[in-house]
Amino acid sequence: MLIKKYLILLLLTLPLFASVKNLRLSTALEMLEKNNLELKISQFNEQMKAYEALAAKGHHYGKLDLSVSGMRSNDAGNVFGFKLQSREATFGDFGFSDFDPTNPDILSVQPTDLNYPTTRNHFQTKISYMLPLYTGGKLTEYGRITKAMQHMSQYDTQKVLNEKIFQTKKAFYDISLIENYIHNLSQIIKNINKLESIVKSMKTEGYAKEIDTLEVQARNAEAQSMYNQAKLNRDLAYQFLSFLLDEEVSSIQKVNDMAPMPQINSADVETNNIDIQKALLGLQITEMAMNVAEANYLPTVGAFGEYGSADNSLWNDFSDKDSYTVGVQLTWNIFNGGIDAANIEKAKVNHLKVQSQVSLAKSGIALKVKKLETEILSKNHDVKSYQKQLNFARKVYENYSARYKEGIVSISDVLIKQSKELEVLLKLLTVKNERNTKIFEINSIMNEGVKL
């Protein structure tokens, strides 16, 4: 019975550990946007910037505070003040009970009621509101800056997404290339096994030597080692893909091992590139910063209002003992040692610096795209060249294998040609991988990572 319970529990938990099989690239990109942990962290930062923008906007609406306080004191000043706030002060509180007009030394009398009042409780409820009426544009500019910073964080999130899409697509193409490599290696191993059978047969008939068999077996062991290493690399690529998607992936749908060449337009690059857009947004922020610095020359005007009530018991006769205060305040800094002027000049210099950074970003990105485009075109020629060399190497190997049967060439000659085939195959797959990487990099630069 206990074993049965364990079996049921195991069956219930199996789906929780099931890995994704036969995963399509389009599906993987959808999973990436939902699951990738780095992307989630960037989105959290984006949300925090949005709340910062809301907080900056809130300063326009002023501040409303409610306070309730309770006190007890026998301090003469406090008690007299409490009675005044409660609108209960009497002439007796001034010590008139000790006043004697017949006393020639009346001015030296210390009134007991005034100096030694009875201990009193005091409860005060007060609501106050402060509102900025004019700040020289500072609040407006601060609001625009925080909004721009929120937009900047959105660019950061998009940049992270582009990077993760780049890595995901590269992982798919890497796995497909490795699968292609493994397939070709398996064919080569089959050919080596066939060659070994031929050598053994010829040895039986006295046309081959023991050293021929050993040479073929050594080459077979080398090919097997490369085959096993390729499978380990494939497993590592799957682990990295699983890390990106935050979900276990055991197999994918293979993609064409040659990624499509993107359509490159210099105007689109400048319009869509995230780094250029961030630089342009940074330029706008420096303009806002100059406005903030210049606002220090202008006055600030604020209004305030206060309403409350106080008594020796909480909320007693509230409306009869209430009071209010309203007012407007203007402050204007006339002189501060030239600090404001220096800050304005600093903001202007920073604006000029960011202008130069924008120009540098535009020219630098354009140069990088052109360089990548040239390298991709070069890789395309390399792919065609290596493909032809691979086809030729295979034909040569087949020819030498047949000539070995006829005793025209040695087994070493055959294995040399087979090594040439393997060498060209590795070069072909390497140059395809390099080409794909550069294409994905251009896609990322052009902010077109989601396009398949």
Image: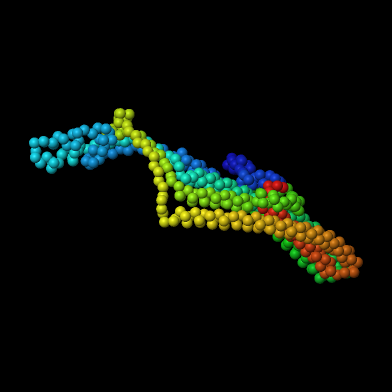
Question: Residue 365 location, x and y as percent?
Answer: 66, 56
Question: Residue 297 location, x and y as percent?
Answer: 45, 49
Question: Residue 427 location, x and y as percent?
Answer: 76, 62
Of the 4 image quadrants, the one containing the N terminus is top right
Question: Residue 240 location, x and y as percent?
Answer: 64, 53
**Is 199 situated left or right of 240 in this image?**
right
Residue at image location 77% in from the left, 66% down from the top: 218
Q: Is 73 above or below relative to 381?
A: above
Q: Can the viewer see residue 191?
A: no
Residue that protrudes farthest toward the front in the picture: 334
65 or 235: nearer the eye? Answer: 65
Residue at image location 64% in from the left, 47% down from the top: 32
**Is 417 situated left or right of 138 in this image?**
right
174 or 166: nearer the eye? Answer: 166
Q: Is 433 above or below relative to 158?
A: below
442 or 111: nearer the eye? Answer: 111
Question: How is colour applied across the structure in the image?
Answer: rainbow
Residue that protrudes farthest toward the right in the picture: 406
Q: Quadrant of residue 364?
A: bottom right
Q: Can the viewer see residue 32?
A: yes
Q: Quadrant of residue 336?
A: bottom left
Residue at image location 47% in from the left, 40% down from the top: 60
